[in-house]
Amino acid sequence: MTRITLDGVAHSYGARPRDERDYALKPLSHVWRHGLAYALLGPSGCGKTTLLNIISGLVVPSQGRLLFDDRDVTRLSTERRNIAQVFQFPVIYDTMTVAENLAFPLKNRGIDKAAIGRRVAEIAEMLDLTRDLARRARGLSADVKQKVSLGRGLVRADVSAVLFDEPLTVIDPGLKWELRSKLKAVHRALDLLMIYVTHDQVEALTFADEVVVMNDGQVLQIGTPAELFERPAHTFVGYFIGSPGMNLLPARVAGREAEIDGHRFPLAASYPTAAPGQRVQIGVRPDHTTLRASGGLPVQVRRVEDLGRRQLARVTLGAHELVATVPPGTTLAAGAAAVHFDPARTHVYVDDRLVEGTP
Ligand code: ATP
């Protein structure tokens, strides 16, 4: 059982960082709990790999401490941290069989033969590799090689954590879904702390118990997939998570009322009036923005997209663009319509941060 604590950890690749912008990872404190699956999610260059490499020991952070349970490991090597890693591309021995590859991390630690056999069989079964156990790795397809690589990462029961860096990059798109759900099942069965880097939100949301959303070197929110959907803590999270992302509109807010371009609508809680110079925005997901023939904020319908299970309308409210759900059976007059925001799902952001209202 290992709990990993980041205590004010930050990293700059340059020797003398002058300001915040010089940090690939801005200061972060967080406890990663044993048995949970985490995903580090964010656009390219946001610092995911830097954070993963700090946890694995490939990068020593320029400030802060890293603890495994109560032991300070900030300057310990990867081997001494007892971490397993799976990379983007398969790391396996071509001349060995699949079984030998899977057994290798255990053999290295002097585990007895019978126990190795049992564990290799168990992991192979979980990853659908049982039929391939006797085959040499050299002849395998890229997909199967990566499954063996995943198996090597998962085979040791005593590791502090298993770290994955975009492990499904080389996997055929058709197989990705299958392997993703398999990894989730493996996680449930093995009770390990897993941390998984990806820039693909579907991958993050299906794999992880908790998703760490990053942008520009900063962790913006750590939460369950439901929390990220229902209460994005930052406008970036609202926009980045969900497809399409959250509608974000500049607004004025006073008490239980908001106003956009002179149009007023109710909020479910009461908010203080923002200070001069603060940027206030309303955030509502398209699922909670309903298009109606009338009775709401006046909009122009630009386009309606039929997505099979639901219809979405791209509309403009004055100069602002947003996406609304079209309820089944709605008849619209050409062009002009109205949108209704569900007050209970309408959030207020000040300078991009979620503000809690008073009920
Ligand atoms: P990607 O998804 O593209 O791999 P990422 O989110 O994993 O991106 P990082 O690789 O952690 O992001 O990079 C964060 C920032 O640090 C980027 O601006 C990158 O250019 C910079 N960076 C990463 N590695 C180094 C390095 N070894 N030396 C200098 N700068 C680096």
Image: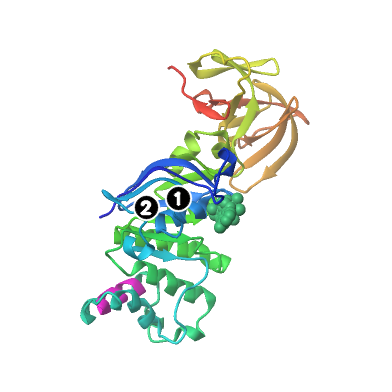
Is residue 122 positioned above or below 320 on the image?
below
How many numbered markers are drawn?
2
Question: Is the residue at mark 1 in contact range of ligand 1, meaning its CB lies under 8 Å from it?
Answer: no
Q: Is residue 333 left or right of residue 310?
A: right
Magenta-drawn segment: 116-124
Q: Is residue 143 above or below residue 261?
A: below
**Closest to the observer: 120 or 108?**
108
Mark 1 near mark 2, Cβ–Cβ under 8 Å? Answer: yes
Quadrant in which residue 170 is drawn? bottom right
Query: What amino acid type should be assigned to the residue bearing mark 2?
Result: Thr
Give x and y (percent) for residue 124: 36, 74
Secondary structure of the magenta portion, mostly?
Answer: helix
Q: Is residue 108 left or right of residue 49?
A: left
- Residue beneath the point at 70% across and 18% down: 261
Name the mark on residue 249: none
Badge 1 amino acid = Pro
Q: Nearer the viewer, residue 202 or 312?
A: 202
The question of residue 310 being in magenta is answered with: no
Q: Position of residue 340 (x, y in %)?
A: 61, 25
Which residue extends farthest right? Answer: 334
Helix or strand or loop: what does disc 1 sit on?
loop
What residue is at 40 percent from the left and 81 percent from the top?
Answer: 98
Q: Which residue in the protein does label 2 denote?
A: 74
Looking at the image, can residue 242 be seen? no
Q: Identify the secondary structure beneath mark 2.
A: loop
Residue at the front extreme, as displayed: 16
Place of residue 197 in the rendered image (x, y in percent of width and height, measured from the top left): 49, 55
